[in-house]
Amino acid sequence: MSVPALAPFTTVLDLAAGALEPQRKLVERTLGDMQGIYAVPVPDQREREVVYRVSEVPTPLVEGNLLCSTTTIEPGTVDGEFHMTKGHFHAKLDRAEIYLTLAGEGRLVMATEAGEPAIEPMRRGTVNYVPGGWAHRSVNVGAGPLVFFAVFPADAGYDYKTIEEQGFPVLVVDRDGEPEILPNPRYRG
Ligand code: PA5
Ligand code: MN
């Protein structure tokens, strides 16, 4: 048996705010980073707006390790399309993931490479299972921040390019304050 590469360690998750202590790695995505992802272009004056933050507990990116993170998506829309993550397949396509929602209300939009969509609810206490082979994007459909905790294999990796090029087969839009799922006319799958 080989010697374990890591010593045990502990991180404290603030269950109300989603913050990790100590915070080891923080990624902030602005609406400018999301240019081309929403149905309409992000207006110049909103490009610097931070739309979501991901706090990760890094571990070496090798088979057998786990990564975990919390994501906080601010409420709002871009021309009626709810704030959301970029979305990705895992670079190792068969790697699965679990999301535990801590606060807010969302929709977890998923899609296979063949373009089959799936939409699951996200609210405090939901545990969503994202099977291998499904691209995934989280959408904040509520009035406050959507906060969720994710755990996944450390060697999963991210394939953002496919989603940047193809989009998801469905959009989640604000229809008089309620989320509505629409087919995405720009989907290229
Ligand atoms: O591992 C995940 O799927 C999540 O932690 C996401 O990376 C996070 O929610 C941000 O989304 P994206 O990576 O699509 O920008
Ligand atoms: Mn993922």
Image: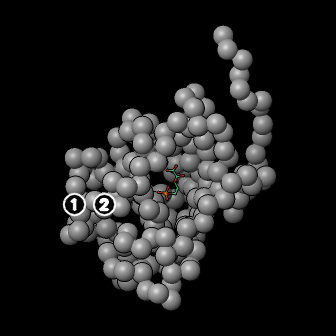
Task: Name the foreground residue: 159 vs 69.
Answer: 159
Count of numbered badges drawn on the protein: 2
Tell me how far mark 2 sits from mark 1, CA to CA: 7 Å
Considering only vertical position in the picture, is 4 above or below 118?
A: above
Left or right of 103? Residue 126 is: left
Res. 15 in view = no
Q: Position of residue 49 (x, y in %)?
A: 56, 79
Of badges 2 and 1, the one in the foreground is 2
Residue at (78% x, 36% y) in the render: 9
Which residue position holds label 2? 165
Quadrant occupied by the N terminus: top right
Residue at (41% x, 49% y) in the render: 159
The three-letter code of the residue at mark 2 reads: Glu
Res. 53 in view = yes
Q: Quadrant of residue 163?
A: bottom left
The three-letter code of the residue at mark 1 reads: Arg
Q: Could you tell me which secondary element the residue under label 2 belongs to?
A: helix
Q: Quadrant of residue 92?
A: top left
